[in-house]
Image: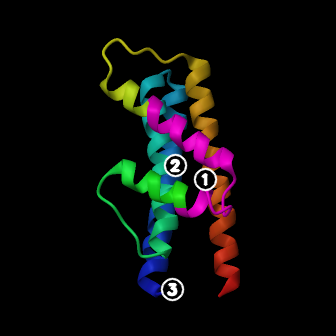
Amino acid sequence: MTDKQRDLSSYRMSQAEETLQSAKLCLDNHFFKDAVNRSYYAAFYGVKAVLALENVDFKRHKDVVAYFNQHFVASGLFENAVGKRLARLQKKRESSDYDDFFLVSQNEAVEQVESAESILAAIHLYLGERQNQE
């Protein structure tokens, strides 16, 4: 792994953590649709941090998620629950952003923020293990 890959991964994780904090602020202020959006993006940036170490990147979200699921979840590097949570976050984000009259309850927003936290915790663990291997 190069310094450039490590730096990009670190930057993306910082972006993920900042976005998670934004999701929590939205939740605290009852902007539930925005909390769902920010939760997805927090997880998405975290996944992109993992891909940065492999020097892999995609322009489309579905390609990022598919690659992560195929190469990291299906291979057992991440638990299946991570892939399922990511898929649910993506679906809810798309619905909340694009569907007319889509309502998000407080409980749903809380669940999505917790999913993002769980995904980022798994990614931090993975990145820490990768760092220790070098």
Which residue bears the numbered disc 1? 120
Q: CA distance from mark 1 to mark 3?
A: 21 Å
Task: Give the dominant element type of the magenta stretch: helix, strand or loop.
Answer: helix
- Residue 95, horizontal then vertical, whole percent: 39, 25
- Residue shown at 38%/32% (left/top)? 94
Amino acid type, residue under disc 1 in the picture: Leu
State the SS at label 1.
helix
Label placed on residue 29: none
Q: Find out whether the residues at labels 2 and 1 contact each other: C-beta distance under 8 Å.
A: yes
Label 3 sits on residue: 1
User: Does the magenta portion include 81?
Assistant: yes
Instruction: Look at 48% across and 70% down and name the residue there.
Output: 9
Locate residue 81 relative to residue 39 in the image: left or right. right
Q: Is residue 62 visible?
A: yes
Which mark is first along the chain, 2 or 3? 3
Q: Amino acid at mark 3?
A: Met
Residue range corresponding to the magenta coloring: 71-92
Horizontal side of residue 50 vs 96, given as left or right: right
> In x, y percent, where is residue 33?
43, 25
Examine the image and state in which quarter residue 113 appears: top right
Residue at the spot of label 2: 43
Task: Give the residue at x 70% y 81%.
Answer: 132
